[in-house]
Amino acid sequence: MNFYSFNMSNELKIIKAEKSKINDIDFNNFSFGSVFTDHMFECDFTDGEWKNPTIKPYQPISIEPSASVLHYGQAIFEGMKAYKDSKNEVWLFRPDQNFERINKSAVRMAIPEFPEKLFYEALTKLVDIDRNWIKSGEGRSLYIRPFVIGNEYAIQAVPSKNYKFMIICAPATLYYTKKLKVLVADKFSRAASGGVGFAKAAGNYAGQFYPTKLANDEGFDQVIWTDANEHNYLEEAGTMNIFFRINDKLITAPTTDTILDGVTRKSLIQIARDKGIDVEIRKLKVDELKDAAKKGTLKEIFGAGTAAVVSEINAFQHKGDLFKLDEVNDSYAEKLKSNLVGIQTNQLEDHHNWRFKV
């Protein structure tokens, strides 16, 4: 990978908040992604290099109305979490995967890649400074949002010359608090071959909002997207990759240029194989899913993502056909979630060296 230069004379600067706002927060009563910690990281790309890396108090940023991101959508992001164990030690989960993916997204969106050393330094110091915001307990963590925006002040339909890389953090609780009812898409599409579906680009999410709202209005929690060509194959949901258990076989779609290479997805695949679960990574037709539901061989559907963790789906609808799933005694979703969270929170052995201590 061709990382753009970073002027090493620009060492990371840290400006701490005079007073923490943590005592103003009711950690038992807030919604995911609505409360933010005391500090943020900011770094600018100008004149062909990343410079002025700074951790500072969380605050508004100033951009001009002509900023390129507002007109042409050059914006990418990542989703990560930090966890606190019973000894109050703080852990990241597979941050190397997020670093690789944000730069993969950057290349596709014509954004300069970010230096690895600076990424880890900024990430770990920011999390360490705001470690008191990380609460232990079921579903609790610190959600970390690195992102990059085009920041050239010019309304020209070309890649921006200037960029801003930032990291903000938010205390996190459960994203979904119940089992989900989903609609399988047969009209709208999330991504097409040759496009940017594999990138964590802001516009990928904006494009889902309208069809997801239509689904919400009909009583569905999420949409499972299908291939853009014929709407025959199941791909992923709006906030997570999707797994299907048919008989005792776990099936998930292969990552392509239309499907996000989820960190939770690949972790669950490895954990499942470690536990002796038969995993198939292959395309799954909507008709095959419906046939399995009719025959009673479809035992589970669940989503996987950093925010969603492992979220069970107990009903789906496609072209007016509604299918409800019965409870299972030996839930793969529960087993995999328990093992994943156990590794993330330092309660279980980390055989694959996924944890990263802050």
Image (cartoon, rainbow, N blue to C red):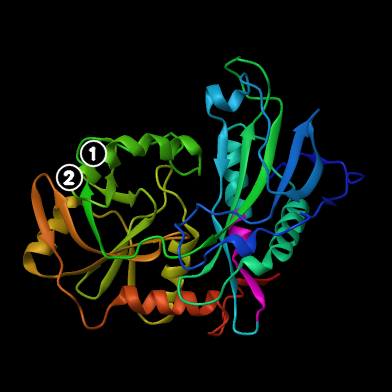
Q: Residue furthest right?
A: 9
> Front-most of 308 and 285?
308
Query: Residue at 63% of width from left, 45% of height from top?
Result: 103
Residue 216 falls left or right of residue 321 = right
Amino acid on which disc 1 is placed: Leu
Residue 355 part of the magenta segment: no
Q: Secondary structure at mark 1?
A: helix
| Residue at image mark 1 | 214
Circle 1 packing at 10 Å, graded few (<14), some (14-19), many (20+), is few
Residue range in magenta is 88-98
Q: Position of residue 206 (x, y in %)?
A: 41, 36
- The answer to whether the residues at label 2 and label 1 have Cβ atoms under 8 Å apart is yes
Residue 236 falls left or right of residue 30 = left
Circle 2 packing at 10 Å, graded few (<14), some (14-19), many (20+), is few
Assign the N terminus to one quadrant of the image: top right
Q: In the rendered picture of this protein, how many numbered marks are placed on residues?
A: 2
Q: Position of residue 297 (x, y in %)?
A: 14, 70
> Front-most of 243 and 84?
84
Assign the C terminus to one quadrant of the image: bottom right
| Residue at image mark 2 | 218
Query: Residue at 8% of width from left, 51% of height from top?
Result: 321
Q: Position of residue 35 (x, y in %)?
A: 54, 54
Note whether residue 192 is visible.
no
> Front-most of 13 and 148?
13
Q: CA distance from mark 2 to mark 1?
A: 7 Å
Q: Is residue 185 above or below residue 325?
A: above
Amino acid on which disc 2 is placed: Glu
